[in-house]
C-alpha cells in the first residue's frame, strides 16, 4: 500500500475550502428552490445548508472557490422553471464545522423581502401520474409537486411552509411524509403534498340526494350530471365555477336565466387534445399563433379568440359577438372532468354579477342553489379568492383585461424608490388594490365592482392580507378623486393620510409607469366616465406631460347625458343626447321621451361628459345593435363585432376651446350612424376609423405645438382591438412611438397601479 503524501507540496495541490453566505431573492419560494439547491450542492460536493428567510433563500456554502463559482452560476442559470432567482448578496463567512449539506427549518425572523407565489397549473410530470393506472395518485384530483399546485389561494402567512397554509389540517400519511422529507424526490418540501389516503376529498350533493363523500363516486356523479345537461357548481383552486355543456342551448339558457346573466359572454374550458393540446380549441375557434401561445402559458388564462363558423358550440355562449373566452384546464380536477367528458364546458365564475368568486362550501350552497342543479365540493379551504385571468391579443401582444389566478398578485419594479409605503385602493369598477414600498409594487387579483357587501368584504380582506403577507404597513392611502366611490369612502375612514388621484391621471400614469424610459408623454385616456379635474365627467382626454405633471391637451366636444349614471346601462340615452345636441329628433326611447327631452333642455340630471365610451354606446344604439345593455360594455362590444371590412374615416373638426384644449367634434358621425341605407358593418367600420383618425389628428396638432413625445393609450376603450390596432397603425405611420399597457390592464383594473405611479412622484 502506497503511503499517504503529507508533504507541503501535496497540501498546496489541494484547493483550499472557502465559506460563503449566498442570499437569493426574487421568485424563490413555492417553486421547489430549496430542493434544487440541495441537489446541486450534492452534485458539486458542497457542504453547508439552505433555508428560507421570509422571501429570500440563505445558503451557507463551503467548497473550493472554483466550485463555488460554478455552483452560483448553476443556481441562476438552471433554476426550476417557475423560479426567477436574483443574486442579492454573496459574502465571505466564518468557516463552520459542517460535514454535509442540509435543508434547515425556515427562519421567520429578520427583515422581509417577500415574494408571494401565484397558483400554478398542473405540471406534465403530475399529469403523467394522474393518468397512470399504476401510480398511487392515479385520478387523484389534488395531485401536485414543487412545480405545480395552489400557492396564493392557500397561504395563510409566510414563510411558505405547510403549517402556514390551509393544508395544515391534513396530516401527511407515512408515504407522503417520506416523499416530503426525501431530497431526491420531486415532492421534497412540496407544501401542498397530498394523496388519496391523507389529502383533500371531494363531495357531491344535489337537493334530491344525500351527500356523496367518496372522492371517486363524487367525481363520477359530477361527470354524469354534466352529461345529462345539469349545471354543476364545482369548487376549484381559487373558487367555484358554474359548469355545464358548452353545446347545450337549454342548459346555457337556464344558466343565463337563473344567474342572471342574459347576454354577457360565457368562458369555455376545452379538453387538452392533440399534439400541442389545442386540437379541441381549434375545432371550435380560430386562434392566431400568439393567442395559441397565450392559451398554453403557465397562467392558463382565458384568452379571447374568434369563433369558427359552423362549430358545434352553442350560439348562446356570446350572443351578438364573434369571439369567446377560451381556456384550458389548469388543475387536476379540471383535467379529469374535461378528459372524461371529452367535450368543452361553460366554466363561468360562480358569483353574483360583479362580485368576487365564491370560495366557501356553505356559502356556495346558500347563494347558488337557485342556479346550480348540483355541487362538487372539496374540503381544502380557500384562503382568498382568485378569479381566472383574462387576456386579449391587441397590437401583436397579449394584454391583460383582468388580473387573476395563476398570474396574481403581480409584482413589478417601480421606476423610482418610494420614501414611504403606500396603499392604493383603485376605483369602483373592476377594482384591484396595490401595495408599494421601496422600489416594489404588488397588485392584487381582480376583486370586482364595489357595489355589493361581498365585494367590499373581499376588498377589505385583501388589503389586510397583502399587508400581513408582505409585512408592510402603509403610511398613506391613495384613492380616486371621485367622492362617491366605495374605495374612496374606505380610504377616508382608514385613519391614514389620504391622497386623492384624478381618475385619468391614474390611467395616464399607469402606461407611463410601465415604460419609464420615455420622459415626455401624450396619453389618450378614453373610457366610460371618470371624475375630472374640473368636476366634470371626463372620458375622452389626451393628457400631456409625465406622472405628477399632467395637463389636459385635447378632448371631445362635450354633451349632456340624460339620466346621468343610467346611461351606462341604457345606451339609447347617449344616442338621444347626441341627436338632441345637433338638433336632430330621437324616437328610440321610452314613451316618456318627450318629458326627458324637456328635462334635458333644462339640464336637469343631465351632467356634461366628454367620454368616448358613451360615444360608443350612442353608436351602438343609433345602429340599432344595443339600446339597453345587461352588462357593462355590451354596446361597444357589439359595435366592434359588427365591423365588416374597412371604411373611409369621416373628418372630425378640431378646434381649440376657450380653455386652450383641442376639441374634436363628433357631430358628423351621427348622420352616418343613422343612415339606414348603409349596412351596419360599414357604419361600424367608419365609426372606428373616424375615432382613430381623430386621435391621430389630435396627436399631430399637439406635436406641432410641443415637439416630440411618446404616445400612450390607456383606459377601457382601448380594450377594443379594432380601434386600438387602427390607432397604433396610423400613429406609427406618422412617426410616433406608441405604447399600450402590457403587464397591467388598460381598464380600471390598472387604476391602483397608476395611483402609485402618479402620487409616488411627490412621495419619492
Image: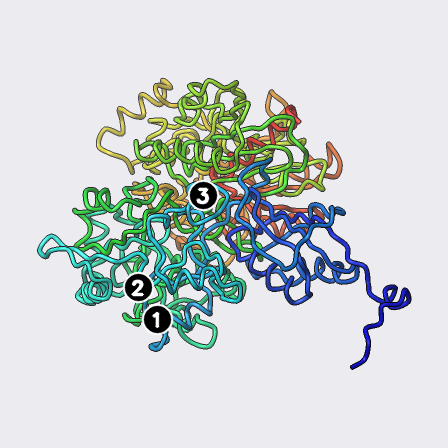
Q: Position of residue 757 (x, y in %)?
A: 60, 33
Image quarter hosting the N terminus: bottom right
Outermost residue, bottom side = 1
Badge 2 marks a residue whose secondary structure is loop
Disc with the residue nearer the chain's start (2 vs 1): 1
Badge 1 marks a residue whose secondary structure is loop
Q: Nearer the viewer, residue 25 or 516?
A: 25
Q: Return the residue at label 2.
A: 196
> Quarter-wise, where is residue 222 in the image?
bottom left
Q: Position of residue 377 (x, y in %)?
A: 25, 53
Q: Residues within 10 Å of mark 3 (few under 14, many from 20)?
A: many
In 3D space, how far apart are the residues under numbered discs 2 and 1 (Cα atoms)? 8 Å
Q: Nearer the viewer, residue 738 or 556?
A: 738
442 to the left or right of 484: right
Outermost residue, left side = 208
Q: Are the residues tagged 2 and 1 within 8 Å (C-beta)?
A: yes
In 3D space, how far apart are the residues under numbered discs 2 and 3 (Cα atoms)? 31 Å
Is there any visible trace of residue 322 in the rendered image? no
Disc with the residue nearer the chain's start (1 vs 3): 1
Q: Return the residue at label 1.
A: 136
Badge 3 marks a residue whose secondary structure is loop
Disc with the residue nearer the chain's start (2 vs 3): 2
Image quarter hosting the C terminus: top right
Residue at image position (68%, 40%) is: 516
Q: Are the residues tagged 1 and 3 within 8 Å (C-beta)?
A: no
In this rendering, the answer to whether 290 lies above or below 480 is below
Q: Position of residue 394 (x, y in %)?
A: 54, 54
Residue at image position (44%, 40%) is: 670
Q: Return the residue at label 3.
A: 445
Q: How many marks?
A: 3
Colour theme: rainbow
Amino acid at each position: 500500500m502506497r503511503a499517504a503524501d503529507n508533504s507541503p507540496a501535496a497540501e498546496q495541490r489541494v484547493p483550499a475550502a472557502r465559506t460563503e453566505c449566498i442570499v437569493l431573492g426574487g421568485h424563490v419560494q413555492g417553486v421547489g428552490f430549496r430542493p434544487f439547491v440541495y441537489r446541486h450542492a450534492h452534485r458539486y460536493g458542497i457542504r453547508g445548508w439552505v433555508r428560507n428567510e421570509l422571501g429570500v433563500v440563505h445558503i451557507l456554502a463551503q467548497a473550493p472557490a472554483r466550485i463555488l463559482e460554478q455552483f452560483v452560476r448553476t443556481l441562476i442559470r438552471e433554476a426550476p422553471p417557475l423560479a426567477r432567482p436574483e443574486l442579492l448578496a454573496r459574502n465571505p463567512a466564518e468557516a463552520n464545522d459542517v460535514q454535509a449539506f442540509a435543508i434547515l427549518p425556515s427562519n421567520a425572523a429578520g427583515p422581509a423581502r417577500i415574494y408571494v407565489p401565484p397558483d400554478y397549473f398542473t405540471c406534465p410530470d403530475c399529469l403523467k401520474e394522474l393518468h397512470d393506472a399504476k401510480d398511487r395518485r392515479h385520478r387523484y384530483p389534488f395531485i401536485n409537486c414543487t412545480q405545480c399546485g395552489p400557492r396564493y389561494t392557500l397561504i395563510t402567512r409566510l414563510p411558505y411552509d405547510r403549517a402556514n397554509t390551509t393544508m395544515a389540517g391534513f396530516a401527511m400519511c407515512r408515504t407522503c411524509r417520506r416523499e416530503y422529507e426525501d431530497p431526491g424526490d420531486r415532492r421534497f418540501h412540496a407544501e401542498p403534498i397530498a394523496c388519496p389516503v391523507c389529502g383533500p376529498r371531494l363531495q357531491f350533493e344535489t337537493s334530491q340526494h344525500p351527500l356523496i363523500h367518496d372522492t371517486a363516486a363524487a367525481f363520477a356523479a359530477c361527470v354524469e350530471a354534466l352529461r345529462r345537461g345539469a349545471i354543476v357548481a364545482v369548487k376549484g383552486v381559487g373558487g367555484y365555477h358554474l359548469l355545464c355543456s358548452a353545446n347545450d342551448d337549454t342548459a346555457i339558457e337556464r344558466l343565463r336565466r337563473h344567474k342572471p346573466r342574459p347576454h354577457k359572454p360565457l368562458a369555455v374550458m376545452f379538453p387538452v387534445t392533440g399534439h400541442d393540446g389545442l386540437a379541441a380549441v381549434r375545432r371550435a375557434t380560430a386562434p392566431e399563433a400568439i393567442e395559441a401561445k397565450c392559451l398554453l402559458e403557465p397562467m392558463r388564462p382565458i384568452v379571447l379568440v374568434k369563433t369558427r363558423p359552423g362549430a358545434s358550440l352553442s350560439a348562446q355562449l356570446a350572443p351578438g359577438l364573434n369571439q369567446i373566452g377560451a381556456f384550458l384546464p389548469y388543475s387536476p380536477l379540471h383535467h379529469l372532468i374535461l378528459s372524461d367528458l371529452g367535450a368543452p364546458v361553460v366554466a363561468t365564475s360562480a358569483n353574483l354579477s360583479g362580485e368576487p368568486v365564491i370560495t366557501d362550501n356553505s356559502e356556495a350552497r346558500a347563494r347558488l342553489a337557485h342556479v346550480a342543479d348540483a355541487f362538487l365540493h372539496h374540503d381544502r379551504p380557500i384562503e382568498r379568492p382568485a378569479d381566472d385571468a383574462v387576456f386579449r391579443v391587441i397590437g401583436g401582444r397579449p394584454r391583460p383585461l383582468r388580473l387573476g389566478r395563476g398570474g396574481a398578485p403581480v409584482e413589478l419594479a417601480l421606476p423610482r424608490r418610494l420614501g414611504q409605503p403606500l396603499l392604493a385602493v383603485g376605483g369602483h369598477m373592476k377594482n384591484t388594490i396595490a401595495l408599494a414600498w421601496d422600489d416594489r409594487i404588488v397588485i392584487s387579483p381582480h376583486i370586482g365592482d364595489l357595489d355589493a357587501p361581498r365585494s367590499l368584504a373581499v376588498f377589505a380582506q385583501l388589503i389586510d392580507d397583502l399587508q400581513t403577507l408582505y409585512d408592510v404597513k402603509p403610511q398613506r392611502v391613495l384613492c380616486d378623486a371621485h367622492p362617491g366611490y366605495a374605495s374612496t369612502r374606505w380610504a377616508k375612514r382608514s385613519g391614514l393620510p389620504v391622497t386623492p388621484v384624478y381618475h385619468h391621471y391614474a390611467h395616464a400614469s399607469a402606461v407611463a409607469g410601465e415604460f419609464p424610459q420615455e420622459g415626455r408623454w401624450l396619453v389618450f385616456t378614453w373610457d366610460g366616465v371618470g371624475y375630472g379635474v374640473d368636476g366634470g365627467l371626463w372620458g375622452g382626454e389626451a393628457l400631456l406631460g409625465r406622472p405628477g405633471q399632467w395637463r389636459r391637451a385635447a378632448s371631445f366636444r362635450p354633451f349632456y347625458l340624460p339620466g346621468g349614471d343610467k346611461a351606462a346601462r341604457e345606451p339609447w340615452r347617449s344616442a338621444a343626447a347626441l341627436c338632441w345636441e345637433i338638433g336632430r329628433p330621437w324616437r328610440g326611447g321610452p314613451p316618456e321621451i318627450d318629458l326627458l327631452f324637456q328635462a334635458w333642455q333644462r339640464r336637469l340630471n343631465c351632467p356634461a361628459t366628454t367620454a368616448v365610451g358613451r360615444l360608443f354606446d350612442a353608436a351602438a344604439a343609433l345602429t340599432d345593435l344595443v339600446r339597453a345593455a345587461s352588462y357593462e360594455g355590451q354596446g361597444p362590444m357589439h359595435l366592434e363585432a359588427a365591423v365588416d371590412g374597412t371604411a373611409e374615416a369621416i373628418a372630425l373638426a378640431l378646434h381649440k376651446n376657450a380653455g386652450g384644449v383641442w376639441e374634436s367634434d363628433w357631430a358628423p358621425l351621427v348622420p352616418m350612424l343613422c343612415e339606414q341605407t348603409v349596412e351596419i358593418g360599414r357604419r361600424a367600420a367608419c365609426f372606428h376609423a373616424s375615432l382613430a383618425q381623430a386621435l391621430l389628428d389630435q396627436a399631430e396638432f399637439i406635436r406641432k405645438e410641443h415637439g416630440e413625445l411618446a404616445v400612450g393609450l390607456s383606459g377601457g376603450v382601448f380594450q377594443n382591438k379594432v380601434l386600438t390596432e387602427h390607432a397604433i397603425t396610423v400613429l406609427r405611420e406618422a412617426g410616433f412611438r406608441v405604447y399600450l399597457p402590457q403587464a397591467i390592464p388598460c381598464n380600471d383594473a390598472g387604476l391602483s397601479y397608476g395611483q402609485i405611479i402618479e402620487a409616488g412622484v411627490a412621495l419619492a
